[in-house]
Image (cartoon, coloured by chain):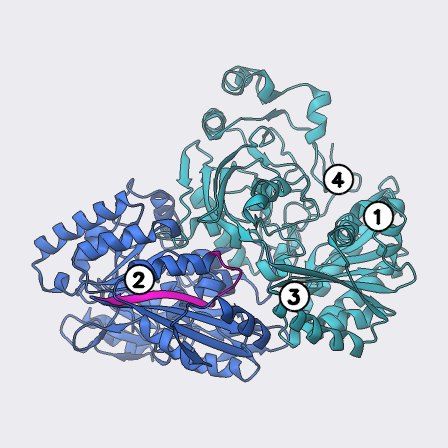
Amino acid sequence: MNDLLERLRSEGLEVSEGSGPEDPPVARPADEAELRAALALADEQGARVVPIGNGSRLAWTRPEVGAGQADLLISSARMDRVLDYVPGDGTLTAQAGCNMAQLEQRVAGGGHLLTPLLSRPQERTLGGTLAAGHSGFDRQRRGPLRHHVLGVRVMLADGTAAVSGSKLVKNVTGFDLHRLYTGSRGTLCVLLEASLRLFPAPEASLTAVLEHSSPAPLLERAAQLRRAPIEPLALVVEGDGGHWRLHVTLSGLEAKVEAERAFLPDGATLEQGPAGFDGLRALDESPVSAHLVSAHLVATCRPSQVAAVVEGLQASGVQRLVIQPGVAEVLAWHPELELESPPLRDRRLLVLADVLRERGAHLAARGLPLGAHRTLAPRRGEAPGLGWMFELRAALDGAGRFASPTFPGQP
Amino acid sequence: VEASLVRPLREIVGEAGLVTQRAERLAYESDGLALKRRIPDLVLLPEDTNQAARCMRVLHHAGVPVVPRGAGTGLSGGATPVEGGVVIGTARMRRVLELNHEDRFARVQAGVVNVDLTRCCADAGLFYAPDPSSQAACTIGGNVAENSGGPHCFKYGATTRHVLGLVVVTSEGEVLDLAEPQPDPWGYDLSGLFVGCEGMFGLATEVTIALTPVPAVTETLLSIFPDLDRCCDAVTDIIAARLEPSAIEILDKLTIQAVEASVFAAGYPKDAEAVLLLEVEGGEAEVEATVAAIDPLLQAQGQLELRRARDGAERARLWAGRKGAFGAMGRIAPDLYVADVVAPRTRLREIVRIATDIAHERGLKISNVFHAGDGNLHPNISYDRRDPEQVRKVLEAGDLIMQACIDRGGSLTGEHGVGLEKQAMMARLFAPEDLATMHRVRQALDPAGRMNPGKMIPLRACMELRTRPIPGGER
């Protein structure tokens, strides 16, 4: 693939070599024409391509990159123009390479808030966030990210640029391919542009944090809050060992926040204003050893099954959990899995997956080596809809240029 | 459809699930788009997923096209039968399979009527949010096919935001069980892709639907305006002020008069040029604060009066008027062309004015009742389909209104779907590459193209091949 590097450069593309011998080169096209040229060259050479933003979350979206199983990364980071921000319509359209922190800042000027609420937005691009399908801690009220993607422009592996949806907040014209692309982890297309629905910046916000030595009472408290006549922006239980915290963030009109305050748990510490948001963001990627890492595992289930799933995970030796009870997602940090030999690690993962399946949950790897992702990735026939997913991938990327060995499943 | 095909299908669905007599099949000749009609060769009414899958397998082996149908209330011709095809209706699939109050979802068969879903979970303080005007008749399966909306979608979003899972029978008769209600299922968002596919990817037989807690307080407001333009501007101002009522609807003078002369009379002022029907929901303090913030914006645009519904009965009456508006138009003329277009919310006044001018220039009667908060307009043209010249003018006006929306950054449909009605206009909104990509996805999921063929995507995405509805419909 050395020739690919030279050919890309000869086409005028900005390309950098990988930082290690296993790392693939990164092409950074400045526009759609350069991107199309890069894809054509990759196709000519039969290269395995992974579309990225800044590549900050590849460890869990495309673990094959770290395992030397990608030939070329194509970053959209240089395609970074805000195309249309219409405060009066509450919509934003931007190129995929736009930095999420800059977008947040831009819409804040018009009194708007961007979803999702994620950690370290300065590291993330719009395209990368959408491709990862990464919903934030505001999902309790807002719902998943894909609900707020109004339209996209993408480039398929064969260089076709195509639009789905629009900039409009309501529109049912044509198939909702933008919902298919959101969360597809770059396995179907390169995202070029996206339009998002925006939300009003809150007049007031208040985050309550209640501590306890175990998660169970906090999960029960969270369940009570879900039944209460309030609409928290975020509802998170997180912790490890004997230190657990329930975070409840209220936001909106001042009168609403003041009225909902009465439902907050006694004994909670309160933080007014956006500082509470910053605390929530930090939960997404937490220090478990010397450095910040994303979760190793993610379990999803029905809300009523969360407590049982948490028990199952705790029994397996996880070090830390971040639980969103309302949306039934549990992130687990399990550093032991990084230290174990692959066969032992994979055996433990399969046992844990079985335990959680009995409790109604699906377990997936998030920040572990490729082998672990492969162990937990479903095979054809194991997950409903996987056949359709492969058909869709074949239809949009017949040569498998963007194919992942683990997502949406194993071939 | 060959007679030899009927026997195996009868064995699957029984006599009660088979409609063969011409007089009975006539009821399935169109949906709400009466301009396009064709009597189907055969109608099947399976009782459950199993029967539907077995029927689909038989039809697959025979190479027979299938048109899925809910209650037939759609307005874009999505359920119009196709030549040589079979209609599969969900009228006998009306069971609620699971109601889970704790996790706030229901699993229902596709033929459950929209409003019945809310009725069956009301005791638990839950409701199903999407509320199209036809909600007393339309089915959840039909809502899924069209990604239906309704007034309260301004706050709660259209059908797609409420579908947690599906059971789909593919064109080959396989059952795809995506019913488990996990908020973020593994892999691609197949349910999200399926919603709004207008029956072209498969037949949804079961739907897992998110239920929403009934708000503590609901305030319904009627804001009365002496001028339609300024009523539109008031909506633009509410959006720009980032206020969040749950519904923002406009009814113009002709609509008000038709409603007030009908059984849906709601007490709207007959001399007003327009009224704005607003609903604000939430906690008491939030509702009060929102209403207090909205009122000055309405006054600044010349609002004559702001009325608050005094009780549940008055609220119900105000909404019955809004939802009965299309029916009330029958007083103006025998037929109604219900346009469904979308405009950026900053350009409401402009598009409403253009639509009105287009109709008036052609001597047509136009009335407006629409989801202003979402920019989803329904310019309604009253006409008599027995008059070919009127039909021609109506279709021409419809095209011009859609084109005006496209030219101003709008779209062809906000909730009724493309179907047959807007199929030709797709090539004006989308580039050939966009349509070709949709076609690739469709081919991936229905390789033989037997599911609702000839709908939504133009056969060839070029202007030369534009087709338009045939005046008087097809027989």
The reply to whether residue B112 is in sight is: yes
- The three-letter amino acid code for the residue at tag 1 is Met
The answer to whether residue A234 is magenta is yes
From the image, state whether disc 2 or disc 4 is nearer to you: 4
* SS at mark 1 in the image: helix
- Residue in view at x 88 percent, y 51 percent: B260
**Residue B215: assigned label:** none
From the image, tell me which residue sits under label 1: B329
From the image, tell me which residue sits under label 3: B245
User: Does mark 2 fall on the same chain as mark 3?
Assistant: no
- How far across and how far down the image is residue B192, in percent? 48, 52
The answer to whether residue B443 is magenta is no
- How far across and how far down the image is residue A323, in percent? 33, 62
Sequence-earlier tag: 4 or 3: 4
Query: What segment carries the magenta color?
Result: A227-240
- The three-letter amino acid code for the residue at tag 2 is Asp
A8 left or right, relative to B360 = left
Which shade of the palette goes to chain B?
Answer: cyan
B353 left or right, relative to A239 = right
